[in-house]
Image (cartoon, helix red, strand yellow):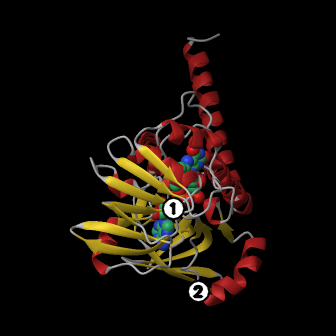
Amino acid sequence: MVNSKIGIIGAGPAGISCSIQLKRYKLDFLILEKDQAGGLLKNPFLIENYLGFPPGIRGEKFIELIERQIENHKIKIIKDEVLSVTYRNDKFYIRARKDDYRVSILVVATGTRPKRLKIPVDLLCKSRIFHEISPLRKTRNKIIAIIGSGDAAFDYALSMSKYNKVVILNRTGRVKCLPVLFQRVKQNKKIVYKTSIDIKQVKWANNKLVLLDNRYNNLIVDYLVMAIGREPNLNFFSKSLKEKANRLKRENKLYIIGDARNGLYRQTAIAAGDGLRAAMRISKKWGHTIKETKIKGTREKGKKNIKNKRDKIKKGTEL
Ligand SMILES: Cc1cc2nc3c(=O)[nH]c(=O)nc-3n(C[C@H](O)[C@H](O)[C@H](O)COP(=O)(O)OP(=O)(O)OC[C@H]3O[C@@H](n4cnc5c(N)ncnc54)[C@H](O)[C@@H]3O)c2cc1C
């Protein structure tokens, strides 16, 4: 069992931002991540709305910078997947794949998980169906179908069209993405955008996926990406923790931050801001620890300076 005062689950923008600020307060914490640091940022084609990057920045490049920042702050991310969290006797008990952890304050920054399309799918097709594009980054000269009509579907299409042909399948005629993404897709000759196509089944034939739609048409592709929405990723909360969650939030012991709590407002800057705020609220709760460190450090430095000055005056090197 690993003990720490503070635990953070998830090292996406929200969790990392929280950890950097906690580090600045010199508060001890542990941070658990099941995958690569940076979270969903491994997907975006171009992040244009995060301050400080005038031409925008690619998701992968952004992650590189975040990794450098983590290194500079000497933050050690524990690679472990949280399976369940319970709360008893004033402590959170985190059961993860490799180890168990016990903390007094818990920050949950686990983002979202994709919604699944409930249609029949042949078993062999499963390895060719994805909900994010990061595993397909190295794919070249293939046909990729993307189901969805929001920002993620259009953003994924732009990323994948660099080396492949892409077809976006929208169930309705309504587009939910940003106008700028729609415009870019329309101008891109390697992306076909189809409306009123409702995929009902996915079959396997001749090493390809066969998508059967509502009009009994077949569409043959190499890969399928489903981008039909996301929901908060909090399914590892035990039943009793779910019941106590609101009280623990009010008592400043439990913080749910970033995409995991932001509904439609799922943006990097908001997630990072959430992380910062959580760390500041935690530091307020543990304020006495911070004050002690500050006063101790400043006084000792001050005393040393006065002594140095006295010595110099004695030696006649300073008037
Ligand atoms: C295609 C696409 C384009 C986007 N474009 C933009 C954009 O242009 N501008 C913008 O501001 N935002 C954009 N976003 C949104 C942005 O990526 C998210 O808002 C942001 O990443 C949310 O950060 P987060 O830390 O809350 O969650 P996430 O980034 O989802 O991070 C959650 C982390 O928790 C980890 N985790 C989850 N469960 C567990 C577990 N059980 N145990 C351990 N670790 C766990 C995950 O592995 C992940 O690393 C885009 C997203 C997508 C998908």
Q: For the residue with label 2, is its CB less than 8 Å from the closest atom of ligand 1?
A: no
> How many other residues sit within 10 Å of disc 1, few (<14), some (14-19) or many (≥20)?
many
Image: 243 above or below 109: below
Q: Amino acid at mark 2?
A: Ser
Image quarter hosting the N terminus? bottom left
Q: Secondary structure at mark 2?
A: loop
Element type at mark 1: loop
Asked if ligand 1 lies within 8 A of label 1, the reply is yes
Note whether residue 66 is visible.
no
Tell which residue pokes out farthest to the left in this image.
206
Q: Nearer the viewer, residue 64 or 311?
A: 64
Q: Residue at x 70, y 79 (%)?
A: 245
Residue 71, how many percent across, how many down?
A: 42, 45
Q: Which mark is residue 189?
A: none
Disc 2 crowd rating (10 Å Cα; few below 14, some 14-19, many 20+) is: some
- x 33%, y 79%: residue: 122
Q: Nearer the viewer, mark 1 or mark 2?
A: 1
Report which residue position mark 2 lands on. 238
In the picture of the structure, the residue carrying the numbered disc 1 is 227
Q: Position of residue 107 (x, y in %)?
A: 61, 66
- Is residue 317 visible to us here? yes
Q: Quadrant of residue 148?
A: bottom right
Query: Residue shown at 61%/36% (left/top)?
Result: 301
Q: Is residue 178 left or right of residue 62?
A: right
Front residue (pair 221, 291): 221
Left or right: 217, with 10 as reference point: left
**Residue 40 at x, y = what percent?**
49, 55
What's the CA distance linking mark 1 and mark 2?
28 Å
Q: Is residue 219 left or right of residue 252?
A: left
